[in-house]
Amino acid sequence: MPRRYLIETFGCQRNVHDSERMAGLLEQAGYEATTEAVDADVIVINTCSVREHAEAKLYTRLGELRVLREETGRDPIVAVAGCVAQQEGQAILGRSREADVILGTQAVRRLPLLIESAAAARKPGRSTAERGPIIDLQPQDDVSFPLGVTRRHDPVKAYITIIEGCNDCCAFCVVPYTRGAERMRAKRNILDEIREAAASGHREVQLLGQIVNHYQAPDDPACDFAGLLEAVNGIAGIERIRFASPHPRHVTPRLIAAIRDLPKVCQHLHLPVQSGSTRVLQQMRRRYTRERYLELVEEIRATVPGIALSTDMIVGFPGETDADFEDTLSLTAAVGFHSMFSFKYSPRPRTLAFKRMPDDVPEAEKTRRIVELQARQRDIQTAIHAQMVGTPVDVLIDSVSRRRDEELAGRTSGNTVVNVSGEPGWIGQIRRVRITRAGAFSLSGEALGEVDAAPAAAGA
């Protein structure tokens, strides 16, 4: 009977992609995937520590696995991976003894070996010390990854890491401490992986890096991020290119021109601002002002008319006053973001804010602010979407709709979700859709026909 694995992923696109890599490694080692914990011989929990609630999810899940072991008699090897594993290491065992393997963010390629070591440690005659758990938090400078191993779960979109780690050390961010210093992947390896994804039917690539637009090819000194986008644009089979997450400080005129001029690069830019207050931005160590951010938005929109902008926002950062929060509300209104990820500040271990800044905004006030900000953003999105009713847009169909089984879902070039009635065979195609109904978070439309491999118009 084949051995089975289950990977549960908490967190961002980088975690999702790490899980795809882990799945490929386990299948190469002879495991088969399952969707049920009760059937699994190996359970990997791939964690995120960017927000405090993500850590809480890990310990809740470990408690559930303890109950599973007690009630079913099943005893899978449990591996904790990802950012919480790297951040907490041995300390995880102080809150739960369920983990057999703890592996850090740079130990992904060693997962099968660590699991086999944990299985060997369970054999009769092994001492308590030999039984583990096994902990591997060692750094790995080599950021390449073997071609043909990654098991991609999305049939349309392929995640491609171009940078690992980060050097910026924003005051609130734990990433430099969980994923290490910034390391660039070789351009040739990136392009080879994208060609492989295209050959397997993927029509969209999303380039990943903590500061993705800081990319500089180690094997081609003349190639910056705009140059990489140009190289990816030339790969046959790829029809859309996205990237996350850029930093406003590294949005150059060359990058803005690349978004305008390269037909496969989507007309959407995620531009995390974090706060609308210059004073708070300085405390966050973001290295730009409110005024510079607004100037950048003007530059982008002047060069790429109709581009969709999205952002990240934090409320309740240490020392944030009512006036600072009003600056956040006014910047939100001034920019008119197409979408926003907004969060209440939570202290992250080892960060500058954790060590030096008291978490002095009351939780109730954080909640009041996040509710007000999200209501303001919802009104903005609703108005933007309402203007699209009656217009045709090009939608890359990527899945069955989460709303209705008979509908499909996809995204415009501007990254807006569109639901449309259609055939399952449309998945992976770009369809022309007339928008008939708009909501705050998605659109609905009627299909007009298939679009040849051509980019959508700006702003669509």
Image (cartoon, rainbow, N blue to C red):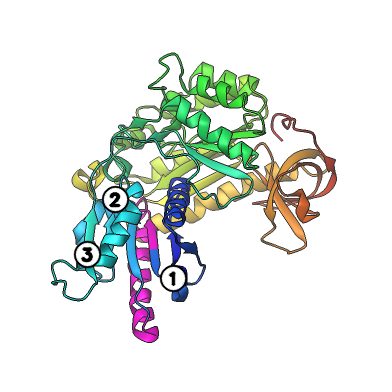
Q: Residue at x 45, y 76 (%)?
A: 38
Secondary structure under badge 3?
loop
The residue where tag 2 is placed is 104
**Which is closer to the viewer, label 2 or label 1?**
1
The residue where tag 3 is placed is 133
Q: Residue at x 62, y 23 (%)?
A: 234
> Which residue is farthest bottom?
71
Check disc 1 and give the amino acid type.
Ala
Residue toward you, 236 or 287: 236
Label 1 neighbour load within 10 Å: few <14, some 14-19, many 20+: many
Secondary structure under badge 2?
loop
**Which residue range is magenta in the image?**
44-73
Check disc 3 and give the amino acid type.
Pro
Q: Residue at x 52, y 31 (%)?
A: 192
The residue where tag 1 is placed is 40
> Which residue is farthest top?
222
Alpha carbon separation for disc pair 1 and 3? 19 Å
Q: Is residue 114 above or below residue 258?
A: below
